[in-house]
Structures are given as C-alpha cells and as structure tokens.
C-alpha cells in the first residue's frame, strides 16, 4: 500500500464574509494550499470536497473557478465530519494507487443564527427540539451528575481555548476571556452559557495530498496520514433522538471511542503516543466527553486533567492549541480539515507561540449530526 502524505495546506479565515460567496472562500484556501505545496492546479488529478450547506454540485462549482481541467470532483456530506470524509476518500485513492496527487477541501457559508441542521425530523422541528444546544446541555448535565463537573469547569474549557486563539490569524475570535466573563455570559441552555459554545460561520481549508514516494520532490516537510477512520452510530441506538451526535446509552460504546480505536489500530499507536490533539469543542461539555472517548483520561477524570494542565501546552496531551472551534467557529465542511491544517503546522514545527515542542503525532477528531464521527491521525 502506498502511504499518503500532506505536502500543502491552505486556509481562508473563519468568520463572516458577506462580500464573498462560498466559491470565493473555497478558492482562496485551495490556492493557498497549492502555493504551500509548490504545485500547480494542473498537477492535481482529483478533488474531494466536504460541505454540508453549499448545495448540489458545489465541488465542481469551486474547482472550475480555478480551472476546468476535467478531473473527477467528488462532494461529501457527513455533517461535521464532511471534511474528514473527503480526506478519507482522498487518502484511500492514494493508497490504492489510483492517483498520486490530489486535493481535499472543506468549505461552508453557514446561515446566521443557531445552526438549523437539516438532519432533524419534522416532528422534532414542530416540537421545538431541533436545536443542538438542547442535546449538548443534556450531556453537560450528565457530566455534572455522574462526575461532579461544575459550571466553573465548563468555563475553564472556554478560557483555555480562547487563550490560544490570539495566536491564530484564521480564528473568528482572537480574544482572551476570564472565568468570570464566561460565567456571566448569557445562559443558552442550562448549564451552558454563550461563551461555552462555538459559532457556526464561514470559511474554508484545503490539503494537497500525494503519495509518500514522490513527496520528497516538493519543498514542504511531508506529513503522513497514518489513519483516517469514519463511523456512524452504534447499535443499540442512543437514548436521545437518532439525529443526536452523542450516545447516552451506558450499554454501548461511545462513537468517539469506537472510531478512535479504529484509528489507533490503523496507525499502530495508542493514545499515549499522541503529541497534540484537535477535537470537537462544539461546547465545553463536548470537549470533556471527547477526552474520555479518545482515551486520554479515565472515566470521570475529564475536569481533573484540565485542572492539572494535562491538556495544556507543556502537559501530556495539548488540546485545541489552534483555539478550537470555540474561537475559530465551525463552518461545518471546513472544520475537520481546518484542524488538520493546524496539526500540519504543529508537526512541521511552524506553530509559533503555540508550538508543542517535538510534536510528531497529531490527532483530529470531529463528531456531528447523525452520529457521524471521524478520527484522523497525522505523523512525521
């Protein structure tokens, strides 16, 4: 099997850009990735596009703005895992020897306001249950009941992630917050407050991926995609509605754990080998849940490893050194690849003030509507 290596990364800043459509946003990220890789658009043999809101044939609409070269362009919609699904397909085609130079891009121009996910059923919409914060808050309440997690603990997640954001020029928000400011922000759904959530927004991210055999021909240090796992909900079904991304059924394995175990097996590593992690901090509670699912803490220790600095730079498992989705925002199709862009910078040693010393293995984790979950492992 031919290994796949990332040789170019590109971003369009995450935020709100009323003067740009999704095609302009995506094209900027793609061009940045090509320039970073030192390749031309004519060198790209196939493109894999992740988006949930851009509509039919959005990938070809984007790529033909750069050049109508006749390459196959494939669109992937897997909720928050859309970008990761595109990367998975790109990597597998490299593995199979079908292509040796491809592009993976994620892009989105999200509607303003609370995310109106099309994954909800009509009955949920009519009953007022089609709002993600409801389910995030139920999970947060479970953490408080079962593990003794407090509102201050939730606030600490936000403070940590926003603290890193000031070093990320691609983040929507570049602002420090105190615990008091987080706790005094508006209550959205008890116990989660406004500054404990990420914001749906707009943006794009892109990767140039090639076979490892030819990666030495290009200027950037290659970063190998060691594993790319994608999963959907497990049986038995969750207690929550089937559109929920979180399973509260104590008899079933959490989908993050299930997906992570696949990724660790494929990469030939364990969680103890991770140097830097970008995970789905849709809200503070989701970050805590991911700690356990990824195997970086024992059940019930999620707040403890945060308080002890384990998930900070200098700790064993630095988490969301990009600022996370809380500060970057979440343009759904772009978020997973955006995580990978930051991990590539970390593994190249280019992360500046948030550089994790000696980072060699990074993990990207996303989980979204319908239980779609992806874990991608990168290494140098």
Image: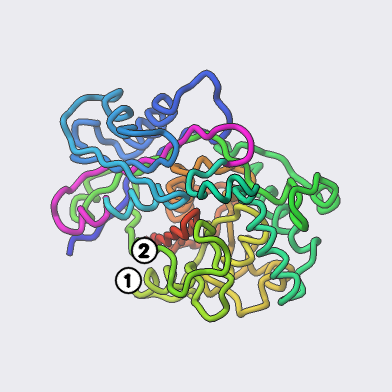
Residue pointed to by mark 2: 229
Q: Nearer the viewer, residue 251 or 180?
A: 251
- Residue occupying the far left of the picture: 98
Cα separation between marks 1 and 2: 8 Å
Image point (58%, 41%), residue name: 115
Task: Mark yes or no: residue 8 visible.
Answer: no
Task: Say whether residue 165 is left or right of residue 96.
Answer: right
> Which image quarter is the C terminus in?
bottom left
Image point (68%, 48%), residue name: 162
| Residue 20 among those drawn in magenta | no
Spot occupied by residue 285 in the image (x, y as percentages of width and height): 66, 61
Mark 1 or 2, nearer chain start: 2
Spot occupied by residue 6 in the image (x, y as percentages of width and height): 32, 50
Task: Mark yes or no: residue 2 visible.
Answer: yes
Image point (71%, 51%), residue name: 196
Spot occupied by residue 70 in the image (x, y as percentages of width and height): 16, 31
Q: Which mark is residue 266?
A: 1
Q: Which mark is residue 176?
A: none
| Residue 92 among those drawn in magenta | yes
Look at the image and give the residue range highlighted in magenta. Answer: 90-115
């Amino acid at each position: 099997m031919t290994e796949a290596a990332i040789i170019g990364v590109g971003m369009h800043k995450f935020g709100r850009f009323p003067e740009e459509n999704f095609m302009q946003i995506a094209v900027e990220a793609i061009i940045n990735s090509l320039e970073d890789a030192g390749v031309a658009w004519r060198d790209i043999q196939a493109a894999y596009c992740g988006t949930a809101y851009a509509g039919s044939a959005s990938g070809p609409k984007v790529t033909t703005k750069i050049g109508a070269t006749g390459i196959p362009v494939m669109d992937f919609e897997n909720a928050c895992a859309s970008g990761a699904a595109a990367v998975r397909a790109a990597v597998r085609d490299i593995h199979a020897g079908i292509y040796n130079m491809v592009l993976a891009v994620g892009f989105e121009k999200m509607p303003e306001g609370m995310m109106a996910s099309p994954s909800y059923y009509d009955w949920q919409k009519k009953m007022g249950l089609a709002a993600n914060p409801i389910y995030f808050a139920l999970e947060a309440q479970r953490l408080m009941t079962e593990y003794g997690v407090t509102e201050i603990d939730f606030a600490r997640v936000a403070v940590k992630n926003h603290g890193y954001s000031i070093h990320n020029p691609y983040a929507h928000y570049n602002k420090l917050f105190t615990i008091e400011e987080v706790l005094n922000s508006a209550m959205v759904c008890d116990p989660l407050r406004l500054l404990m959530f990420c914001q749906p927004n707009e943006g794009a991210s892109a990767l140039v991926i090639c076979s490892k055999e030819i990666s030495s021909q290009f200027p950037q240090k290659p970063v190998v995609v060691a594993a790319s796992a994608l999963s959907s909900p497990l049986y038995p079904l969750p207690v929550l509605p089937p559109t929920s991304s979180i399973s509260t059924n104590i008899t079933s394995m959490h989908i993050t754990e299930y997906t992570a175990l696949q990724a660790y097996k494929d990469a030939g590593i364990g969680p103890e080998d991770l140097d830097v992690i970008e995970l789905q901090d849709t809200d503070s509670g989701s970050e805590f849940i991911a700690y356990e699912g990824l195997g970086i803490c024992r059940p019930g220790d999620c707040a403890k490893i945060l308080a002890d600095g384990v998930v900070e730079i200098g700790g064993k498992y630095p988490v969301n050194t990009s600022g996370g989705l809380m500060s970057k925002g979440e343009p759904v199709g772009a978020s997973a690849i955006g995580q990978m862009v930051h991990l590539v910078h970390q593994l190249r040693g280019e992360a500046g003030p948030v550089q994790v010393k000696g980072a060699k293995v990074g993990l990207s984790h996303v989980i979204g509507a319908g239980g779609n979950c992806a874990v991608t492992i990168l290494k140098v």
